[in-house]
Every structure is written in structure tokens, then in C-alpha cells.
Amino acid sequence: MGLRGEAAVVGYVELKPEKKPSGPPLTSIEQWAQLTRLALADAGIDKREVDGIVTSSIAESGMFGPATLAEYMGLELGFAESIDLGGASAAGAVWRAAAAIELGAADVVVCAFPGGPLPSPPEPKPHPFPFGASSAEYGSPQAEFDIPYGNVAQNCGYAQIANRYASRYGYDPRALAKIAVDQRTSACGNPDALFHGKPITIEDVLASPMISDPIHMLEIVMPVAGGAAVVLAGRERAGRLRKRPVWVRGFGERLAFKTPTYAADLLRTPIAEAARRAIAMAGVRHDDLDMVSIYDCYTITVLMTLEDAGFCAKGEGARFVLEHDLSCRGDFPCNTWGGQLSFGQTGMAGGMHHVIDATRQIMGRAGANQVRACDTALVTGNGGIMSEQAVLILQGA
Amino acid sequence: MSEQRYYEDVTEGMELPTATRSVGTTQMFLYSAVTRNAHRIHYDEKYAQTERLPTILVHGPLQGAQLSAFVTAWMGPKGFLKKFAYSNRGMAFPGEPLTLKGRVLKKHSMDGRPAVDLEVWEENAKGERLVPASATVLLPARALT
Amino acid sequence: MKKPVPVPTPATRPFWNALAEGKLRLQQCRACSTVFYYPRTCCPACLSPELDWREVAGTGTLYTYTIARRPTHPLFADEVPQRLAVVELDEGPKLTSTLVNLRDEDIRIGMRLAPVFEKQADGRTMLLRFQPADESLRSDARAEGGARQAPLPEVSALTPEVLAYVGRTGEAVTGYPVTAEEIRRYCYAVDDLDPRWLDLATPGGVSAPPMFVSIPFDIDRPLHELSEDGTALEHRGVIFPPVTLKRKLFGGLEIEWFRELRPGDVLTRQYRVLDIVERRGASGPSVFVRIEGTYCNQHGEKVAVEVNTIICR
């Protein structure tokens, strides 16, 4: 059971994040086409070879998104998938693409996640998601039981998780802050990162404004415009490319709730089972991992992932963080491009940067931030409020 | 201090030898200390008066412990206090003469062991039962020793 | 854009209708007895559509919270700082709410909470918020705010919340090790000079007098853990139902012993609420709460079981 490891990430594109977009706004469909062109160019694959796509929802096509994309880009597809797993969508897309390739449904699959601003129509419409990730539609449980209490958006949910964690295991704000600091160290070696050239200290993090107790501003991602895509290909096609293929060896996925209020146990995240499955499928051990790229919407997400994915015991995350250097130069390289905390969060594309972080390291293209002899990596995707989890094991050989 | 009492020596209705006690402030101090009880009602007269008491109050559990010791002394070193129950019905004040009394209610066997049920109590000079209590003791039997 | 209020669906309408009357109703599955929140057309545990509505007290504990210093959405700017809570009801389900009528510094995960039925600005919608069950922790900080609290429904002494405590256990607490010196100190205080407790030459060594069993749990406390009257502010392992009658009287103690206690033994005590009974007398109602305490030694062997009767009136 599981993947045979015969599908690989063979190319990618990562748009430079921008706080204030410089170019003209493009529709999601237009952004998709742009990302596809750039990712295929990176892979060295012709557009006519593409026979599969995985996409998040397309703003202009609430229905028939994949078919509209195929039509727009002139593609003929054997595999088309629309994925709705929040920040876990990118990792979820990659294993679905790999599975489709191994099953023979497609040979070259593009997974693209636009993250740029959309053009405004001449007659502005109300925002389609006025409460962000909480659906305000009639009949939605969130609309009825969460939004009226102000339980909206992400900060409060993650803060509630952090406080619950604190009541059970204690809480060292310095350890949480160090996660952001170590990632900033890596970002200082990545000219594309939003916070390139702006090193920070633990004191800076703790002195930043408290947004939602116990989470400080510098422990939260900053939304930016951007976009990212990867191309996957099967063994035969990947073998004829010049770049080192990055094989998808294992995956795990887990979700059971939308709003953390209704989680059976907030301190046992779905990460645990997703990671256990991915690691078991790939047949690797934690020691085999040369780097990790852990979804980092908040510092607490990283801390709990370290624990639940088995890098340290439950409740030991803070000590683990304090005992290891998590920067690209350190003994436990994590989010070596700076993480979303320092690169910026490109909306739904945010999770794809973690896939690309690991891919870039295994391909040996990380430049100043290159981790020595990087062959095996673990990537996590985290959607909702630690509610949707996808984990990948990527390998160079 | 106490002689051994055997099951055969006990008859239903027999009375326990009465004992007299008087709990003074020194003993109350010791009991507060060993129970780590800093409640001012047991040593601070002014505080006790704010609680509308004439003076400081003897610890209820100390009265229970004295009654229990009254029973263990009666049963002797080879007896085993199996059950003891008491409640504090009235207050006792320092220096007040208190009398411990008791009688045998029933002889029976408990899990195959000779057992005796007792009624014991502590009363004040007016004969008010401040602390009614009951006990079941397991006693050795001569026939078995 | 107006502040969002819940719009009931046919399936959830009974819930909101009850809430409007100051009552909290939860659904319970007829097939598997699961009690759940929020209301649905099927049981999330077994998917059975056979469900009953059950009125509950609405009391619970704080599962987690955060204080949002920036509004979670511009429409909630008037509520900043938002005390966003997850409340675990005594029946088990968790729900989203906010904390009201208390100070931030008094918020503790695990604190007991009582419901507040709060009518909204639209004059129709009732929301369920929570305040401390402990009245001394309540503040009237919100009294001047726009939202006004509906009066709590009248309750009898034996509320479902109180009765829910029957069978509950407190934390198991380990006492300090039994020593010959401590036994001696106790015997001197009780004036029990029986050599079996005191004479170290006793064959088999000394044992502790039976009533000594609770002494290792009388722990030393720093001054700041004592209240004005000298009593301890907090007792570990103690569990007691939130009876509204204020006066608590010691009603008596029953103990049964199973084995002797000797120096070197280390006892663990766990309390359990045995039963709660209401009696009505000339002076009004009294509630008798019986709490069982089980003492085990370091080998897990039962040493004694006590039953305390506490009378609330």
C-alpha cells in the first residue's frame, strides 16, 4: 500500500512576495496560466505534455474550475482535481498528483496556487468570504454557533490552542519566539523573503504587540501577494530531465473538525497520525531527515508539529527548540527559506512554499541557505486551525 | 498501658471503664501543630469572639481522636479497630471536664473473625453527649490462640 | 454591515427557541446516549437520527480561552478585548462562547462557569455567554455596557449541576511519608500514650493509631496560602459540588480500616462524591453531601476508607 515513489517534483516557481503588489492585478485563471508557464519552464517540460492539474478553488469559477482552466490554457487532461484543505491544500495536491501519476491517470501534473490580488469588477460586489475561513452562509455551523461570538479568523483559535497547551505542559514564550528568530536568520540568506535583511531577537518578538494572548505579532504570518506552483512527472519523464527529481515517497492526511472548539482533544493534533503514516509509508526514520519544512502560520503550529510529528516527546517542544538551532545553518534545519513567518504568507499558496523549500534543498538549489547533503525531507501542510493536516516525505534518491 | 482483651471476656451490655479528659490550651496548641491547622478559632480568643463564640474551640477531630484512642486502649494491643464513626454535636471549650463512656452493643463475627460493636461517646459536665460515636473492633479469642 | 446574529435552521430552531427563554437544551442520541453540541439532524457519534432534547444547567468548566487585543473582525471592535472561550459543559460537549462579568486576571483554564443568557441588540436573539460560577469572582464591569443580562432562572438546591457531581472523583494526592517521629508527635497531641504507637522496641515495630491516617495530608503551608482566619485557601484533591447554600457544617466521619499503617508507608488519598441528599426541616432545606476518601499505601493496598458527611444549609 501507499506510494511506490515513482512520481517526482521536477520543477517549481515561487513568485517574489509583495506587501503592495507592483504589477496589474490578474484573475485567478490568469495567475494559474502564468504560474504554469513559469513552473514548466523551470522543469524543462513542454506545455503539451501536461495531462493533469490540481487546483484550489478558482475565484471566477465557483463551479467547473478545472475544466475552465483546461479550456483557458488549452490543456487536455486525464486527471483534474480541485482541493479544499486550506493550508494543507498544497501538500495534499502534491500527493494526489503523485498518486494519479503512479496510477497512470496522468504523466505530468501541475499544481498551482495563485496568491495575487484579483482585479476589482466595475461594480464591486460584497466580499465572498466576509468572515474569512469561517463561513457566514445560512446553515453553516460557523455562521450559527461561532461567528456570533466573535470566534472569527485564525488568531483566536491558535491562541486558544496555545493557552490550552500552556495549562497542560507549561509555556515558555522565549522558546516560541526562538522559532521566529531562527527562521528570520534563514530569511536573511534569502533575498526573496519579505523580511530579508531584518534580523530579529527573542526580545524583539516578545516586545511586539500582543495580538491574542499569548501570541505576539511577530509570531504570526504577514499576508502578502504572491503565488507558487510545482510540476510533477513520472519516473520515465523525470529521468530525462536535467534537474534532480524529488520523489514523493510518503504521505499522510488527517482532518476531523473545522473549528477547534469541537476538536475531541486540542492537544493531540491531526498532525500526529498524518506524520506517522507518511513516515511509515516512506520507510524512513526521523534520523534520516536532513531538513524539515513545517507549516508555520504561527510559532505554536511549529512547536506542536515538532511534538506530534515525533521529533520530541509531548510537552518537550520548548526544550527541543531551545536545544537546537532551527536555521538553515543549524543542527535541525527547519523552514530554510525563512518560513512563511519571514517570507510572508501568500494566501493559499503559502503551503506550496514548504513543498518548494524541501524541493529546492534536495535539488541542491538553495544557494547560501543550502543544507549540506540534503536528500530526505519532511513537509507539513496545515489547514484551518490545526484542523487539516497533510504530510509529505520527499527524497532525492 | 492496656491489657489484652479477649472476645470471651466481653459480654453484650457491659460498660467500658469511664475515662475523664480535659483538653487544655497546651494540648490544643500541640494538636493544631501536628495537623498543620492555623485556624485562629483554636488559639485566638478575640477572633473566636468575632465568630460569636465565648472563647476558643476544642478541635472536633481531636475529640474524635480521643474517643478512638479510648476504644483502642480498651481493646488491647492485639485488637484491631475495624470501624469507627463519630459526629460533633456540641462544642467543647478548653479546660472543660469531659467524660468518655461506652458500652458493648453486640458480639458477632465479621469475615470469620470475632468482632464487637461498641457505642462510645464524649459528654460534658451537664451530661450532654457532645460526640456520639460507634466502633467495631476485632478481638482475639482465647479459643483460637 | 451589521453584527452577525445566528439564523436558525429547522434543525436548530428548538435550540435557539429554548435559549430565548433562558434555557439551554442539548440533543442526546436515543441510540448511543451521546450528548452533543451544536444541534444536528443526526448524532455525530453514530449518525442515528433518533434524538431527544434535554435541558441542562449550562454549567461547565473553561476548556481554553484567549483575550483578543485586536478585534477578530472589524464588526467586533466594540467587544475588544474579546475574551473568547471554549467551554466544556458538564455533560461533555464543548461550545464556543465568550466570558463576561469577570476580570482578566481571574481567568483560569479549568475554572467553573455558569451560563449568562444575553439578549442582543436586535431584541430577539439570545446568546449564551459564561461568567464565573464562583460569585466572588464576578465583576459588574459589563453592567454599564450595551448588553444587559437576563436574570438567571430560579434553581432548587439540588440542581442538575450539583447532582452531576455524584460519582465524581478528585485528584489523587500523596501524603508525606509516615515516620515514627510524626506518629509520636500526633500521639502526644492526642494524649494517647499507648506503647504500640510509641515504643520502638515493640515486636514488629510501632504502628500508627488508626486515626493517624489523615495526618500525612495535613501539609505545611506558607503564610500567603492561608486566609485571614488562618485556614488554607485551597485543598488539593478535594471535590465538592457547587451547592448554593452557603453554610457548611461537619456532619460526621465514618472510617473503616483494612491494614495497619507503619513508619515508611506513603499514603495516597482520593476523594469521591458518594451521594447528595436534600432534607427539609423547620429551618429550611439542608443538603447532605457524603464524600468518600480512599487511602492506599505505596503498594496500592487499601489502608482505609472514610466517609465525610458535610451539611450545607
Image (cartoon, rainbow, N blue to C red):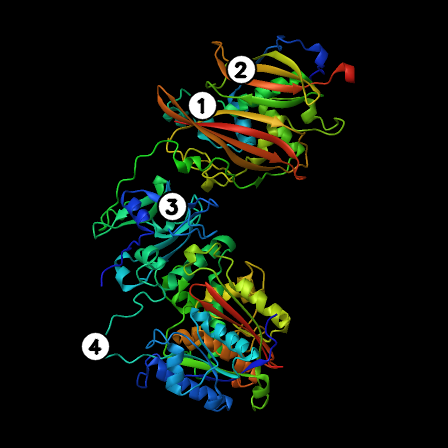
The quarter of the image holding the C terminus of chain A is bottom right
> Mark 4 and 2 residues: CB-CB less than 8 Å, in contact?
no
Q: Amino acid at mark 4?
A: Glu
The quarter of the image holding the N terminus of chain A is bottom right
Residue C260: x %, y % from top left: 67, 29
Question: Residue A224 appears in which quarter of the rendering?
Answer: bottom left
Instruction: Classify mark 1: helix, strand or loop.
Output: loop
Residue A147: x %, y % from top left: 32, 58
Q: Amino acid at mark 1?
A: Ile
Classify 10 Å Cα crowding around label 1: few (below 14), some (14-19), many (20 and above). many
Q: Do marks 4 and 2 share a subunit? A: no
Give me the chain letter of mark 2: B
Q: Dot 1 corresponds to which residue?
A: B56
Question: Left or right of A47: which side holds A308?
Answer: right
Find residue A123 and name its label: 4
Q: Amino acid at mark 3?
A: Leu
> Which mark lies nearer to you, 2 or 3?
3
Residue B127: x %, y % from top left: 49, 9
> Which mark lies nearer to you, 2 or 1?
2
Question: What residue do we see at 45% from left, 42% from top?
Answer: C224
> Which mark lies nearer to you, 4 or 2?
4
Find residue C26 and name its label: 3
Alpha-carbon span between mark 1 and mark 3: 51 Å
Give me the chain letter of mark 4: A
Alpha-carbon span between mark 2 and mark 1: 19 Å
On screen, residue A311 above or below C233: below
Q: Dot 2 corresponds to which residue?
A: B122
Question: What residue do we see at 65% from left, 19% from top?
Answer: B137
Q: Do marks 2 and 1 share a subunit? A: yes
Alpha-carbon span between mark 1 and mark 4: 84 Å
